[in-house]
Amino acid sequence: MSSFAIIGSGFGGLSLAVRLQAAGHQVRIFEKRPKIGGRAYQLKDAGYTFDMGPSLVTAPSIVRAIFEAADRRLEDYVDLVPLDPFYRIFFHDGTHMDYNGDAEQMKSQLAVFSVKDAERYDDFMSDIKGIYDAVITEGLGKQPFDTIGKMARFVPRAMRLNALLPVARLAKSYFEDFRSRFMFSFHPLFIGGHPFRAPSIYAMIPYLERKEGVWFSKGGMYSIVEALGKVFEELGGQITTSAEVEKVIVKDGAAKGLQVDGSVFDFDGVISNGDVTQTYLALIDPQHRKKWTDRKLKAQTQSMSCFLMYIGTRKKFPELAHHTLILSERYKELIDEIFAHKELPEDFSMYLHVPTATDDSMAPEGCESMYVLIPVPNLRASTVWAEEKEEYADKVLDFLEEWGMSGLRDSMEVCHIFTPDDFESQLNATDGNAFALEPKLTQTAWFRPHNRSEDIDSLYVVGAGTHPGAGVPGVMLSSEATLSCILEDYPVGTSQTMSNKIDVESVA
């Protein structure tokens, strides 16, 4: 049995903790915040419950596999509820579509605006199935891309599948109406990607959604966080919260411990579920980093950030589905301002998560719990959020009331604001990113920081910053990729130095 520390407790870290503990190693999680969850945190206020980050499950089979690795049943811990529609999308011209996995319903809606698009729907789904099969069925998403040979073998197949084309360009080759093109290209935004430069390996998400559905965990997505934490502790794992890691201890070129709030803990290996750029920059001395130098790390492109408002209202808004998108007339131009020009746009495209449309327990009786998410530039932009956030929030509320949510302001009982500054200060996110490194072609697969550190032995990475990337399915798949690296290096049953020889009770 070997001992491992995990820095951070997001979905990726918790998933790996369960898998590694179940495999026979001893694992301890160190979490900076008072509760586990990382970006999948929870906020409660005045009877309202908010998931602060991830809001949906698109691959229950991936979640289920983590519980099965621990000889547990997912259904014994959480109650997943299927959603229909998956998303309600309101376009700038007043039209809307209910996006779901029913092929006939989708084709019927598409035909209202373009008969040709309805006719091409099946072809599109058939073609992106090839990408899905490669990533999910054949497991490329859960295998480490840690050699150039693996990448070289994948590229010809990816080219045959058109998986290296930008997602928006692929959608454009099938569909002519702007609504259709948006519906089948917006998914990279959910993982911090620019649809016009994220490779079409991410275009498989509509097929994944149609195959497995879109689900919500009753009581909030945080119930999955709690379930993973519970299973981990049932297996004998240890969680220490309110414990900020200050340094990874490197001895003879290998990660062998952590400095946490002034105390040192010995381990056989260290895993980071924190922001990957910050892990290398802030926790590991430069002399140990030949590949991930300060210069190289600072040259990486971080994802955009988000402006979030967590709102509780005394009235309900039945026009909103559980997942609702309200779109600006501009698509590429708006995204370019955010990603490329680092400018805060005057107009909005926004995502509203309204869990009370499905689960009344998320708010007091007759009330609505929602969060409003607006993509904004990360902190490479010049916006000073400490000065701008209240005015910007007012602008968002004005827009929503004019759009049709009359009485929103008067009915608000709770309103919390989360800005790029908070991503940086609370989550140690480089440049206040919301989704780690941007998933563009030159930061995908082998080009991302590897699950097994290229610089330091016994150091591993899990979560959004490594392969395969952000999103709940992505970070959970990364736990399998990272696990395979660890078990290659530390087979269960081999003799290793036991950890925690220094007082483990000094961090509480």
Image (spheres, grey):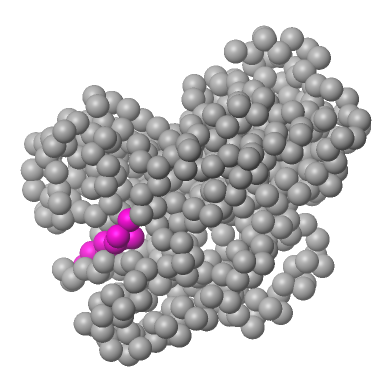
Query: Where is residue 118 drawn, in percent x and y?
Result: 32, 84
Q: Is residue 60 left or right of residue 259?
A: left
Q: How many marks?
A: 0
The answer to which of 450 and 433 lies nearer the viewer is 450
Q: Residue at x 61, y 31 (%)?
A: 232
The answer to which of 407 and 133 lies nearer the viewer is 133
Q: Residue at x 90, y 35 (%)?
A: 494
**Majority secondary structure of the magenta segment?**
loop
Kindly indicate the quadrant of the structure image that contains residue 241.
top right
Q: Is residue 218 left or right of residue 447?
A: left
Q: Quadrant of the N terminus?
A: top right
Let me know if residue 90 is in the magenta part.
yes
Q: Quadrant of the C terminus?
A: top right
**Residue 288 position (above or below residue 215):** above
Query: Where is residue 164 drawn, in percent x and y?
Result: 60, 74
Q: Residue at x 66, y 62 (%)?
A: 139
**Residue 201 position (above or below residue 104):** above
**Residue 164 position (above or below residue 284):** below
**Does the image show residue 421?**
no
Q: Over which residues does the magenta segment extend? A: 83-92
Kindly indicate the quadrant of the structure image that contains residue 414.
top left
Query: Where is residue 171 drawn, in percent x and y?
Result: 44, 78
Kindly indicate the quadrant of the structure image that contains residue 321.
bottom left
**Does the image show residue 403?**
yes
Query: Where is residue 169 drawn, in percent x and y?
Result: 47, 78
Let me know if residue 338 is in the magenta part.
no
**Residue 14 position (above or below residue 93):** above
Q: Residue at x 34, y 71 (%)?
A: 102
